[in-house]
Amino acid sequence: MRIFTLLSSLLLLSGCSGNWGWYVVNPATPQGWINLKFMLSGLVYTVQLSATAIAISIVVGLLVALPGLSPNKWLRGLSRSYVEVVRSVPILVLILWVYYGLPPVTGITIGVFWAGVLALALSDSAFQAEIFRAGIQSISRGQYEAAYSVSLGYRDTMRYVILPQAIRRILPALGNQLVYMLKMSSLVSVIGMQELTRKANELVVSEYRPLEIYTVLVLEYLVLILIVSAGVRWLERRMKTDERG
Amino acid sequence: MNQTAGAQGPFIQFAQVSKHYDAFQVLKNINLDVAKGERIVICGPSGSGKSTLIRCINGLEAYGSGDIIVNGLRVGVDRASLAAVRGRVGMVFQQFNLFPHLTVIENLMLGPMRGRGMSATAAREIALRYLARVRIPEQADKYPRQLSGGQQQRVAIARSLCMEPEIMLFDEPTSALDPEMISEVLDVMAELAETGMTMLVVTHEMGFARRVADRMVFMDFGEIVEVAPPETFFTAPKSARAQDFLQKILNH
């Protein structure tokens, strides 16, 4: 099914070919092969960037979500404000701000990679917090009461009873965020991160073949994301086996 | 109403306990002493405050004014006193509230390991012992959803017993069960009563009440209307409200 989607999109594209110059990325020619390898060399950065950012955003998201569920209204307000503020800043703006704005303010220079990770993680953490909040709120009051009645404290109740169930429920949403993150990592190209999109841009500048090169770029993201989606679905199925029927 | 039971003084004491939900008063000036080993069955119309009453004992609900003393320890709202009380008081819920992501044995081991700090080996041993006592040792490695309602409730009872509590609270333990499964749960509870466990049971199972209860507590509109031994309560209820209630649940 996925292979079919891929092939049909390829056919559709080659069908409307007038002046295609596929030679730029034809692996059969020496220059085409070099170009293709150049484009693919960005893959590792795209993956590293997204994976690191999502890992951080999950942790930060949870740390923001928990006070948001507290009976204390100040803690709830703090969590709420974080979500509202961070959510209203466009990712691209955040990337620029972190890379160009943070060093003069803090005196700390950070590399392109960590600036990208920081901006992506920060932006995503607000969404992660909302996902965690909804997931945790979906667990019934009775689960807390049962845990408290066998002498578990708040921390153990969260760790052993509530979060394991909440995470199973929000797994599809976390998968969506991962896909979103992979796509948004392309924006980090603007500060010079050598990921997939940046590589494609550089190649376009030297080869003047934007149509072909960006088509390959589209396919790179498509394949990457289809693989990730399949992985998330597999994980969902595996964890579903011990959820309530 | 403030009947003192037993020479060693009350094991659980309610002294002028009241509780409001906004303008609505759920508990009105509750006074009740329960002796060690006593079996109390609490009944009354829905919304009469029965569940709230027993949920105040282990602090699942806070009460507004008055005192609840459990074995010399006042139930407060601070973490330390709640943890201390919850270590002594087990609770069985109407909806079982088993942990669906854990197997039966893991459900039973969680409290002993995380609440009492026992090792996995010791927790497993105690879990298997109580699972055998509720007569479902063969279900240890199943998930709750694979069990019948009656079996799930027996697992829930075993889970509480693994904490080796001094008091067991039952909040309508058979109300969510299919009729054919009610007796298997009541039998386990009756056996538990024979071991001398102090029990407070909110239930509409009047046969069980007659068989097991030392005293009946009848509640209506947030207050204790009548406290009497079951034979007196069922044959000669004093208050009109209790008479009315009994007529409704016994004659149909």
Image (cartoon, rainbow, N blue to C red):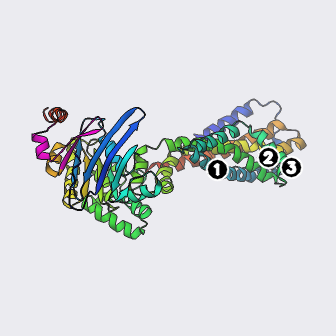
Earlier residue among tags 3 and 1: 1
Q: Is residue A238 left or right of residue B233?
A: right
Residue shown at 14%/38% (left/top)? B238
SS at mark 2? helix
Q: First in sequence: mark 2 or mark 3? A: 2
Q: Does the magenta stretch include residue A178?
A: no
Residue at 50% in and 47% down: A166
Viewer-side residue, B33 vs B40:
B33
- Per the rendering, the mark at residue A60 is 1
Residue B95 visible in this rendered orientation of the protein: no
Q: Relative to residue B148, is residue A55 drawn left or right? A: right
| Kind of residue indicated by mark 2 | Val
Residue at which label 2 appears: A98
Location of the N terminus of chain A (image quadrant):
top right
- Are the two marked residues, 3 and 1, in contact with CB atoms closer than 8 angstroms? no
Which mark, by number, is residue A104? 3
Count residues near mark 2 (Cα–Cα under 10 Å), then give few for <14, some for 14-19, many for 20+: some
At which x and y percent is residue A112?
Answer: 81, 51
User: Looking at the rendered structure, which numbered label has been put on residue B237?
Assistant: none
Q: Residue at horizontal 70%, vertical 32%?
A: A12
Return the chain for callout 2.
Answer: A
**Numbered disc 1: secondary structure:** helix
Task: Tell me the quarter of the image containing the C terminus of chain A.
Answer: top left
Q: Which chain carries label 3?
A: A
Residue B214 rendering spot, x and y as whole percentages: 17, 52
Q: In this view, does B136 lie above or below B51?
A: below
Magenta residues, start to end: B215-238
Residue A41 vs residue A87: left or right? right
Judged from the image, the secondary structure of the residue bearing numbered disc 3 is: helix
Q: Distance between the residues labelled 2 and 1?
A: 17 Å
CA separation, marks 2 and 3?
10 Å
Label 1 sits on what residue type?
Val
